[in-house]
Amino acid sequence: MMKNIKELSIVFVGAGNLATNVAKALHLHGFHITQIYSRTIDSARVLADEVKAAYTNKLDEIQSNADLYIISLKDSAFVELIGEICKNKNEEALFVHTAGSIPMSIWEGYAKQYGVFYPLQTFSKQREIDFKEIPFFIEASTSQNAELLREIASNISDKVYEATSEQRKSLHLAAVFTCNFTNHLYALAAELLQKYNLPFEAMLPLIDETARKVHELTPKEAQTGPAIRYDEQVISKHLQMLADDERKQQVYELMSKSIHERAK
Amino acid sequence: MMKNIKELSIVFVGAGNLATNVAKALHLHGFHITQIYSRTIDSARVLADEVKAAYTNKLDEIQSNADLYIISLKDSAFVELIGEICKNKNEEALFVHTAGSIPMSIWEGYAKQYGVFYPLQTFSKQREIDFKEIPFFIEASTSQNAELLREIASNISDKVYEATSEQRKSLHLAAVFTCNFTNHLYALAAELLQKYNLPFEAMLPLIDETARKVHELTPKEAQTGPAIRYDEQVISKHLQMLADDERKQQVYELMSKSIHERAK
């Protein structure tokens, strides 16, 4: 591809949280997004309006002559639709997906030029995000394609790396622990506080400091709380307080055991 | 007590993470700390040096004529030593503890003036902290004592509240989820990344955004990841990757189930 990267026509397949945030960031930096596909026509339209693109909810209406296709679907949908997506497209087009746990090799037999464009972040449609700090992990079928993806990502982020499919899979798994599971702990705490008519906001300075701490200390050094020495007195009181919610009790017990084992 | 609060003589019983941080903050704001007790003489000396106080590791050498005793021991040690600590002390002295899950009533029969002085934060000795944003929860045997504790806390923090023992217990339990368990998830992720030779630093933007998000969205709204819709494809791959570590697998499965239940 010899065009200036800002002249490439880019099609997004998917209009979920990740696609929405990446498409908006690219649009904001002058990239040319020509079409949004989503199974849900409303999602396609909402995102298309924001990035001044066409939209469709029909796979066979996806433009055939784009330069870059960014696929951002749920893993199972992607695996199911990959053949359909690649069919009858510009032979020189570059196909990339944004999934942490799908290897690059999935493209083999479907596309000639391909790669992966993976931003390691948690995206919600309701929240705009500063992309500068988001690490992008790039992988591509040729060094030329890798260079192109690197150039695109560098326009929106200061942190662009190459990573193999194996490394990306591990990053994604670690991210599930640090982000998805962590947020769920916040959710469990919010339920507890609501039960006792206390505001969740009281937790925010603690949540912030817990995150800040591991910029300076290793998580192991930063660990505090009754589970380290398995303080029976505190732990049994807490388990009693959770007696009406077996799931929270299980989480409390398992996390406490796991902390204690590693502190010994 | 009619003295100016900066003239009160304050004794700390305990020199752990919390005592160290609170004592240093009070000292920095001109409060007069006269003595540090710790079972471990080295801990007592280190903190005493920082706040220009005397120190001891003998319970019967704790000053008898202080105005305020701040007890910050492990729950089990506190329960065991409370009688010893209160014995032969100034009758008008105010005794407070800093424990989330111990009710104020523990002082009954031991002290005449008493209360609780609970900062909701995670403290490590290696890390200095800005106290301004830390919520302090105060409880006291008389409104006069509550006023005194509020005045002291207000010197170091902008967020001072009164809370009953019941409320404080719930705050503490919620804090174990949002801080101790969250930090442990960071630790598990760090282990995973180390196994694959990837730097933990790659997680920091994600950790920060996960914390920032719940300033704007409820944790329920902020939830992302494969567990929401119980994406079998991703989840079973992840469980395979954890096959050599049963504890991590248990954490992964339990957290995923708990997320999925609440998303339905």
Image (spheres, coloured by chain):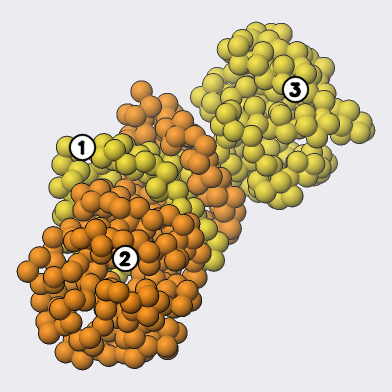
Chain colours: A orange, B yellow
Residue that label 2 marks: A148
- Helix, strand or loop at label 1? It is loop
Q: What residue occupies the far front of the structure in this picture?
A: A2
Label 2 vs label 1, nearer the camera: 2
Q: Are marks 2 and 1 on the same chain?
A: no
Kind of residue at disc 1 = Asp
Q: In the drawing, what numbered circle is on residue B169?
A: none
Q: Chain of mark 1?
A: B
Chain of the residue that carries numbered disc 3 in the rendered image: B
Q: Amino acid at mark 3?
A: Val
Q: Residue at x 78, y 23 (%)?
A: B33
**Quarter holding residue B251:** top left
User: Residue at position x 77%, y 29% from top?
Assistant: B27
Where is residue A259 shown, x and y percent of the image? 37, 34
Q: Quadrant of residue B60?
A: top right
User: Looking at the image, which residue is at 24% across and 68% down?
Assistant: A96
Marks 3 and 1, Cα distance to the nearest angstrom? 45 Å
Asked if the residue under mark 3 is in contact with the one under mark 2, i.e. CB atoms within 8 Å, the reply is no
Q: Nearer the viewer, residue A180 or B104?
A: A180
Q: Nearer the viewer, residue B240 or B94?
A: B240
Residue A97 is situated, as x and y percent measured from the top left of the image, at 24, 67
* Res. B26 visible in picture: yes
Q: Secondary structure at mark 3?
A: helix
Does dot 2 land on a helix, a strand or a loop? Answer: helix
- Work out whether residue B222 can be spotted: no
Q: Earlier in the sequence, mark 3 or mark 1?
A: 3
Disc 3 to disc 1: CB gap under 8 Å:
no
Q: Which residue is mark 3?
A: B51
Q: Are marks 3 and 1 on the same chain?
A: yes
Dot 1 corresponds to which residue? Answer: B245
- Place residue B55 in its image quadrant: top right
Picture coordinates of residue B45, whole percent (x, y): 67, 13
